[in-house]
């Protein structure tokens, strides 16, 4: 009987260790903005390439002084690529799209911005202010990779989404007063 209990316990312990390891590998970051802080849980277990890429930018200080340059109420806020002077920052190589990860573009999730090329995401990200399931992967749509979720500060996201916007050069929906990302740091 004891031998059976020990065998069962030895089979169970690796599963517990894997579950604990998955939680530990899903870090949190704080997006410190001129309007307040937004805390995000990253999903490294579901979007490992995207989270590693994002954290490389975080750890290098890349996001310091960038802005939310595209704000559309009842849709999303996008940032992480331009300075307050609307100068685009140089980025690293694009990454593969991980939108088949079964995570959905629901209210409060973080996703990678990209061009029409599904594998073109670099530093820019957006926070869904509402559920935008049309941005999810389907067999006909490559989708946008969700890689995190706001766990504190959604009121800040909602406030940013109310910013008066206009055009800046070729860009539309740019806040008239820059909404600065002071920095993004690991928590």
Image (spheres, rainbow, N blue to C red):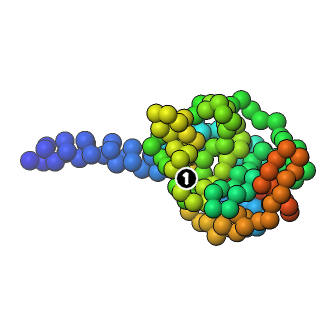
Q: Label 1 crowding class (10 Å Cα cut-off): few <14, some 14-19, many 20+?
A: some
Q: In this orientation, which residue lies closer to the viewer: 61 or 165?
A: 165
Q: Is residue 16 visible?
A: yes
Residue 86 left/right relative to 19: right
**Toward which corner of the image does residue 97 lie, by quadrant?**
top right
Q: In this orientation, which residue lies closer to the viewer: 89 or 56?
A: 89
Residue with the most extreme left position: 1
Q: In this orientation, which residue lies closer to the viewer: 1 or 138?
A: 138
Residue drawn at 61 percent across, 32 percent down: 118
Vertical position of residue 72 compared to residue 12: above or below:
below
Q: How many marks?
A: 1
Q: In this orientation, which residue lies closer to the viewer: 161 or 182?
A: 161
Assign the C terminus to one quadrant of the image: bottom right
Q: Which residue is mark 1?
A: 132
Residue 124 in percent (x, y) is at 71, 44
**Toward which corner of the image does residue 158 lie, by quadrant?**
bottom right
Q: Is residue 37 visible?
A: no
Residue drawn at 34 percent across, 48 percent down: 16
Residue 115 in percent (x, y) is at 69, 36
Residue 40 left/right relative to 91: left
Residue drawn at 85 percent across, 61 percent down: 176
Residue drawn at 25 percent across, 41 percent down: 11
Vertical position of residue 55 compared to residue 163: above or below:
above
Residue 49 left/right relative to 68: left
Q: Secondary structure at mark 1?
A: loop
Residue 71 in percent (x, y) is at 73, 57
Residue 26 in percent (x, y) is at 52, 49
């Amino acid at each position: 009987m004891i031998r059976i209990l020990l065998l069962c316990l030895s089979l169970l312990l690796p599963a517990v260790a894997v579950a604990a390891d998955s939680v530990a590998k899903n870090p949190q970051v704080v997006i410190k903005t001129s309007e307040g802080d937004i805390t995000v849980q990253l999903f490294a277990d579901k979007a490992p390439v995207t989270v590693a890429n994002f954290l490389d930018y975080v750890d290098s200080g890349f996001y310091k002084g960038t802005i939310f340059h595209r704000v559309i109420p009842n849709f999303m806020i996008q940032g992480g690529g331009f300075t307050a002077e609307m100068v685009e920052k140089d980025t690293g190589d694009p990454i593969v799209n991980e939108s088949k990860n079964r995570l959905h573009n629901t209210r409060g999730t973080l996703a990678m911005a990209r061009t029409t090329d599904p594998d073109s995401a670099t530093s820019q990200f957006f926070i869904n202010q509402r559920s935008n399931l049309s941005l999810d992967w389907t067999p006909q749509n490559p989708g946008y990779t969700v890689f995190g979720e706001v766990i504190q500060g959604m009121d800040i996201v909602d406030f940013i989404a109310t910013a008066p916007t206009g055009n800046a050069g070729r860009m539309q929906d740019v806040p008239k007063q820059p909404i600065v990302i002071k920095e993004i740091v690991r928590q």
